[in-house]
Image (tube, rainbow, N blue to C red):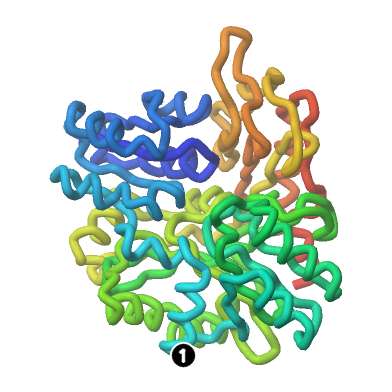
């Protein structure tokens, strides 16, 4: 069969690598892809939001399955457009992708169906939001309602910080239209854990757990980014936590969406906070996390195509997800200055060092193929992932592998997975 993947980051490279392992697949295309994806798929110069061109390409090439990796096209309704053209697509339709597309919607859903989450209020007027802050407790969390590349969340320790945050999100439109509506919620403390899941509208099957590092600098300092590294599994995601979440969060979310007439098929990402009062939902995403996909998918034993088709066909209950009894760690190599300002176009040396090395992966995020070679083309450039018999070994292997590649302005956190040592 022929598969088209929509997206251009490390997540899509990880998806492409999994698709390439399937015996069902003969040809892989990616729109628009990147230099790394281009080594295992044919990249086509079509942007992820160019729906008409994607549909036309899929019809022309007789694509059997399109996997939409990115949030923007999912929230924008690409799956609906593909389905309307008689094409099979993996990912939620527009009415279900709102689970990620609107934080206000997801918070209201959790409140209505008693799914554990932080207390919150929603505002469409900046003056009302500023007035609410006068009596709020601190720290407090501000969330732009819409999509903001993982950066639309501000943790404010003082009233002054919070007021400035409201101004930047709602008035200065730092995150564009994503800030037209604002969610202000209580600050929760505890360990963060990410759990990805496959969903077919009624059945949910969770994947192995992971833990992300959002802040740009060591010690969780600096600005929020799209993710500076991750590891899997999380030692903090215990059997007790899993049992609680299965009873109160996972199936409850799928059932809630169905009850709202928004049947969800695809991947739900659960961002969890393990608080003293039990696990609570921090956020939902309507697709594979990035870089979480880069540590979860390499450990999955199942054929990703079989699982995706089961989600589409409503037969996920017949699938038993299996993961390797090992661990993975991903360290993101970023461009110096990310996530604010950074330069592009630097040649990347040493990529050949990953060829033929079992258990080591170099997932491309912001790269481009040029006459000079493969060059940097984004803030997050590469995701260096390695396996190990346990998390400590995987962490050692991943950091050793970060030395195999180099480019001008190469930057990374040096404490990805350090929490492993504290578990």
Most distant residue in the top direction? 371
Residue at 71% x, 28% y: name it.
405
Q: In the image, residue 216 lies at what x, y percent?
A: 77, 50
Which of 160/36 is in front? 160
Q: Residues within 10 Å of mark 1 (few under 14, many from 20)?
A: some
Residue at 43% x, 44% y: name it.
15
Q: In the image, residue 4 lies at what x, y percent?
A: 31, 36
Which of the 4 image quarters holds residue 279?
bottom right
Q: In the image, residue 152 lies at what x, y percent?
A: 64, 58
Which of the 4 image quarters holds residue 250?
bottom left
Residue at 51% x, 80% y: name it.
242
Left or right of 211, for residue 140: right
Which of 64/394 is in front? 64
Which of 205/94 is in front? 94
Q: Quadrant of the N terminus?
A: top left
Query: Which residue is under mark 1?
Result: 114
Left or right of 208, for residue 75: left
Q: In the image, residue 163 lies at what x, y percent?
A: 78, 69
Q: Is residue 419 above or below residue 228?
A: below
Residue 269: in sight, yes or no? no
């Amino acid at each position: 069969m022929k598969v088209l993947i929509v997206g251009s980051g490390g997540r899509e490279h990880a998806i492409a690598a999994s698709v390439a392992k399937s015996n069902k697949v003969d040809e892989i295309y990616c729109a628009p892809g990147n230099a790394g994806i281009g080594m295992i798929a044919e990249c086509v110069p079509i942007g992820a939001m160019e729906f008409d061109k994607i549909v036309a390409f899929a019809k022309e090439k007789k694509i059997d399955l399109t996997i939409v990796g990115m949030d923007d096209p999912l929230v924008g309704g690409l799956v609906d457009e593909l389905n309307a053209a008689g094409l099979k697509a993996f990912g939620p339709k527009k009415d279900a992708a709102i689970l990620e597309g609107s934080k206000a919607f997801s918070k209201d859903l959790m409140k209505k169906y008693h799914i554990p989450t932080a207390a919150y209020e929603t505002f469409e007027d900046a003056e009302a939001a500023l007035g609410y802050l006068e009596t709020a407790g601190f720290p407090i969390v501000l969330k732009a309602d819409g999509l903001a590349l993982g950066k639309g969340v501000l943790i404010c320790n003082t009233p002054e910080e919070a007021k400035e945050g409201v101004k930047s999100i709602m008035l200065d439109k730092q995150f564009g239209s994503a800030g037209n509506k604002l969610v202000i919620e209580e600050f929760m403390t505890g360990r963060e854990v990410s759990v990805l899941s496959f969903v077919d509208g009624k059945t949910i099957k969770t994947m192995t757990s992971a833990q992300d590092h959002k802040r740009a600098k060591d010690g969780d300092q600096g600005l929020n980014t799209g993710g500076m590294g991750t590891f899997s599994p999380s030692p903090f995601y215990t059997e007790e936590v899993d049992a609680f979440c299965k009873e109160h969060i996972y199936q409850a979310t799928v059932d809630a969406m169905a009850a709202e007439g928004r049947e969800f098929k695809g991947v739900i990402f659960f961002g969890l906070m393990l608080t003293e009062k039990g696990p609570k939902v921090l956020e939902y995403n309507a697709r594979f996390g990035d870089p979480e996909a880069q540590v979860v998918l390499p450990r999955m034993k199942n054929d990703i195509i079989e699982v995706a088709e089961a989600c589409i066909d409503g037969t996920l209950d017949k699938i038993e997800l299996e993961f390797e009894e090992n661990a993975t760690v991903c360290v993101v190599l970023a461009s110096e200055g990310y996530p604010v300002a950074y330069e592009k176009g630097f040649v990347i040396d040493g990529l050949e060092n990953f060829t033929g090395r079992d258990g080591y992966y170099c997932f491309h995020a912001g790269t481009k193929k040029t006459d000079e070679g493969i060059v940097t083309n984004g803030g997050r450039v590469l995701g260096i992932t390695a396996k190990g018999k346990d998390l400590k070994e995987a962490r050692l292997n991943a950091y050793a592998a970060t030395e195999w590649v180099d480019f001008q302005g190469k930057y990374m956190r040096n404490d990805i997975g350090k929490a492993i040592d504290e578990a």
